[in-house]
Amino acid sequence: SLSFGNLIIATGARVKRPAFLKGPTPDGVFFAMTWNDIERLREYVEKRGAKSPSMTMKAAVVGGGLLGIEMAESLARLGLATSLYHGAAFAPSFSRTGAHLIQAALEKKNVAVGKQRVVDLITDASRSTIASYAVPSSPIEKPAVRGVRLEGGGEAAADIVVVATGVEPITEAYAAAGGRLHSSGAISVGDTQATEFPFVYAAGDCATVLDAVTGKETYFAYARPARDAGY
């Protein structure tokens, strides 16, 4: 054990894996949380594109939040035929008018925005009638993604799938110690980042923030609130 005068918990958050991602992540499926994630995605696009420069790669972005919107725009800018699937919520941080403007801007940049929910991945190890750009994997490689299955039974080809379905706070140790969690699973803190335990504070993506408008606790896992929690 270690003694302390003040303790700051800053365990951050991890990618929230959707239900359709069971087991090992197939080749061609990417998360967009860290700079290294983005670098791996860019390298993958460049290598695949170099193999067949005359073919247009297809990308599916899963998630309609800020990260999904930014990823869809970036992939379209790289020349990929890009579709964004958002289920029920698109640009939830904005007003309805703002969301409509964002969707129109994406569509102007040749991003197809669909309200369908992705329910499964199609890989070269699963049966499907869709055609895909990607070269079949060798037996020693892990399965490669070939597309997505949509709610209602539809399918869409995809050589790359970017999962941008949000993050979840890493708070298991705090909860095991009897700490109180917000409904989001984040550590509940006050306006000084103090937890319910004396001399114990939490900040960043593992903790709640106070909504400037309502004054209530909320979970907002973005860089600016995490940075501001340190002041």
Image (cartoon, rainbow, N blue to C red):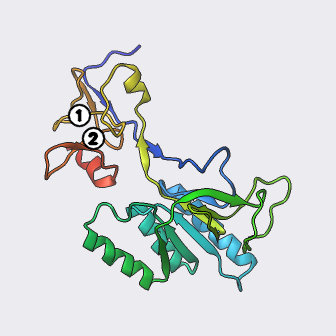
Res. 164 mark? none
Residue type, mark 1 in image: Val
Viewer-closest of 106 and 225 = 106
Q: Work out whether 199 lies above or below 17.
A: above
Residue to which mark 1 is pinned: 189
Question: In the structure shown, which secondary structural element does the residue marked by tag 2 occupy?
Answer: loop
Percent x, y for residue 36? Answer: 53, 56
Sort mark 2 into few (<14), some (14-19) or many (20+) by Cα contacts within 10 Å.
Answer: many
Question: Cβ–Cβ below 8 Å for labels 1 and 2?
Answer: yes
The quadrant in which residue 180 appears is top left
Q: Work out whether 2 lies above or below 212.
A: above
Residue 230 seen in the figure:
no
Viewer-closest of 61 and 177 = 61
Q: CA distance from mark 1 to mark 2?
A: 6 Å
Q: Residue at x 26, y 73 (%)?
A: 97
**Picture quarter with the C terminus:** top left
Percent x, y for residue 66? Answer: 38, 63
The quadrant in which residue 82 appears is bottom right
Q: Residue at x 18, y 35 (%)?
A: 190
Mark 1 or mark 2: whose residue is earlier in sequence: 1
Q: Residue at x 38, y 65 (%)?
A: 90
The quadrant in which residue 173 appears is top left
- Apparent side of residue 54 relative to residue 13 in the rendered image (left or right): right
Q: Residue lying furthest front in this view? A: 152
Residue to which mark 2 is pinned: 208
Q: Work out whether 112 lies above or below 168.
A: below
Q: Residue at x 70, y 72 (%)?
A: 48
- Apparent side of residue 168 relative to residue 192 in the rendered image (left or right): right
- Apparent side of residue 186 relative to residue 39 in the rendered image (left or right): left
Question: In the structure shown, which secondary structural element does the residue marked by tag 1 occupy?
Answer: loop
